[in-house]
Amino acid sequence: MLKPIFAALLIAQTLILPLTGKRTRAIETASLFHTLFHDFFPEDDDTTYVQTGDIPAMWLRDSSAQTIPYVRFQREYPLLRRRFAGVIERNARAINLDVYANAFQADYHVWERKWEVDSIAWPALLAEVYERETHDATIFTPELHVALRQIVYTYSCEERHATCSRYRYPYRVYTDDRYNPDTGLIWCAFRPSDDPVQYRFNIPQNIIAVAGLRAIADLAYNGYRDEALARHADRVAARVMTGILRYGIFYNAQRRVWMYAYETDGYGRDNLMDDANIPNLTTMPNLDWSSAVDPIYLNTRAFTLSMDNPWYFSGRYAQGLGSPHTPYGFVWPLGIIGRALTSTDDVEIENSITTLAETDSESGLIHESFYPDGYWRYTRAEFGWANALYAELLFRTVAGMPETPLVRGGTILPFEERSVTPTLVPTVVQLDNTADLVGTLGNLLYAGRDAAINQQP
């Protein structure tokens, strides 16, 4: 039912992407809204189920990250608010069912119960971004209030995992289980890639937990006047932040620089790597932890985007971050996008966009990973999270749209200014591209409204 409608609409507008070597490529603007119309499903309980592309499940992280790039368009099209508020409510209900589960089916049954620290931070960040952009108080439901309490309590409990937590995973996970219980950091079981951690304290996940806790403090006070919850969230955030700065930064004697570890046990053993899945070390500025010119971040970035990182790969068609989650040597577009979003160098961003444009699918969609010496070998034909983040990259670089900060006010590290992704085209072109994007979204919303809104997973 959708195909004839979308086929007609795709004729409408294109964006001209600047590539390396003074080349250009035209892409259909509708492809940048693909996940919004193919992965978001309104449900009978007034929530929105968000499928992560070609897997029939809703990840708390992915669904939130897939939504945030499109919140900006609610100004032109307020009817989107119901769809976005529905994501917030469904995530709240899912958290209240099982705070340790990371993914759910459309009927709320648990799809995976992997404790990923960042998983429950993302719904809070989405709620804070949405409330800040819309001032829509309808999201402050009893379910969200309970979910925010659950998140803060769980983070606090997992700081004292050995004496507080009852989380167990049903099969053997090969992780080094020696760790310092007095770091203030949150105990982890799995990475954002769904793979088990090597050491129990994953630094990027703890970083986004701080951001999520700060968002909860704002939501608790602004939405519920719950000062006790706001103070509790702030206290936990302060402890975790102190733990990151004390145990997550180390001196790399080989490189002779201070840098962040990907994981640590709190006793001085660190895992030196980065994974393409976000949150990771490469995207710390995009997580509002630091600026993109913070010296320790730059030292870390120089490592993560080099062959010294065991999960950084290079080939004929691409180079970038990979992951133990996919075949060894495969590059993730998500990692290439994260690199571009945190770069201050026009050439680096242009190179990243060129790689993405030359290795995507025939329909302009983004894969999970691909072989850099043969991009036609890939995993997952359609990855909703990567498609949404690719749209965010182009919204910023070729349409000049300001980014949507995750944290209110500025970076988490004090005295640092939030970084801005450079634009690659003149202002007049940015304005024209913005008009095309807004017009395309309007066409998709109204001309295909009945079909798009009534689709079912």
Image (tube, rainbow, N blue to C red):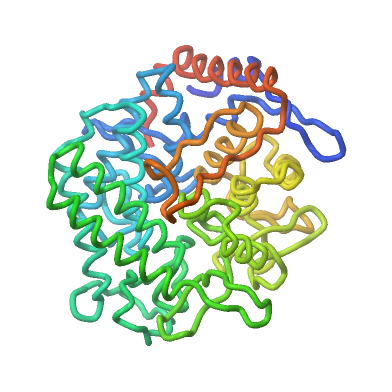
**Residue 18 screen position, x and y as percent:** 76, 33
Q: Tell me which residue sits at (68%, 58%) in the image.
A: 320
**Quarter-of-image position of residue 4:** top right
Question: How many dots with numbers?
Answer: 0
From the viewer's perspective, is 434 left or right of 217? right
From the viewer's perspective, is 109 left or right of 409? left
From the viewer's perspective, is 314 left or right of 21? left
Towards the viewer: 454 or 440: 440
Above or below for 197 versus 137: below
Task: Determine the residue located farthest toward the top in the rendered image.
Answer: 447
**Residue 429 screen position, x and y as percent:** 69, 20
From the viewer's perspective, is 317 left or right of 272? right
Task: Determine the residue located farthest toward the right in the rendered image.
Answer: 21
Q: Tell me which residue sits at (51%, 46%) in the image.
A: 417
**Quarter-of-image position of residue 276:** bottom right
Above or below for 249 versus 297: below
**Residue 337 screen position, x and y as percent:** 61, 47
**Residue 265 screen position, x and y as percent:** 42, 81
Q: Quadrant of the C terminus?
A: top left
Task: Determine the residue located farthest toward the front in the rendered image.
Answer: 415
Towards the viewer: 241 or 89: 241
Q: Tell me which residue sits at (65%, 16%) in the image.
A: 432
Q: Tell me which residue sits at (37%, 52%) in the image.
A: 211
